Image (spheres, grey):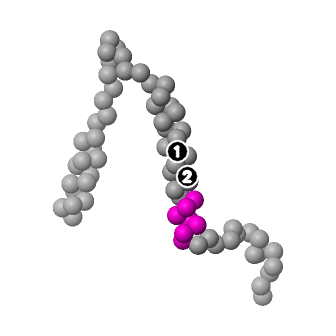
Amino acid sequence: MYDPAERNKWPPRTQPAEDERLARLEKTARLKRLRSYASWLAPDAYAQFHDEIDCSALIEESRSLRLA
């Protein structure tokens, strides 16, 4: 038997267009936050150490996925 209280446990389903709009709004908010953090950064030519991101693992993973 259907319990009316069960209906309130799950959020109502949204339309695909609404999901896309919400995803865009979230992405825009994240980009704005990232830009505000990036605005605080300033390159330092005299810095003793420079961080580098090693992407070789990602490249190897993508190559192995293409070969599979």
User: Type of residue at label 2?
Assistant: Glu
Residue at image location 25% in from the left, 59% down from the top: 65
From the top left corner, tell me how far across and down residue 51 is, in percent: 33, 26
Q: Where residue 1 sits in the image (x, y, percent)?
A: 78, 88
For this view, does 32 lie left or right of residue 63? right
Image coordinates of residue 33 in percent, x first then y, are 54, 39
The residue located at (36%, 16%) in the rendering is 44
Q: CA distance from mark 2 to mark 1?
A: 6 Å
Tell me if label 2 and label 1 are in contact, CB under 8 Å: yes
- Please state which of residues 55 and 13 is positioned toward the viewer in this rendering: 13
Looking at the rendered structure, the kind of residue marked 1 is: Arg
Magenta span covers which residues? 16-22
- The residue under label 1 is 30
Q: Which residue is mark 2?
A: 26
Left or right of 13 in this view: 23: left
Residue 18 magenta-highlighted? yes
Residue 30 at x, y = what percent?
Answer: 52, 45
Residue sitting at 49 percent across and 25 percent down?
Answer: 40
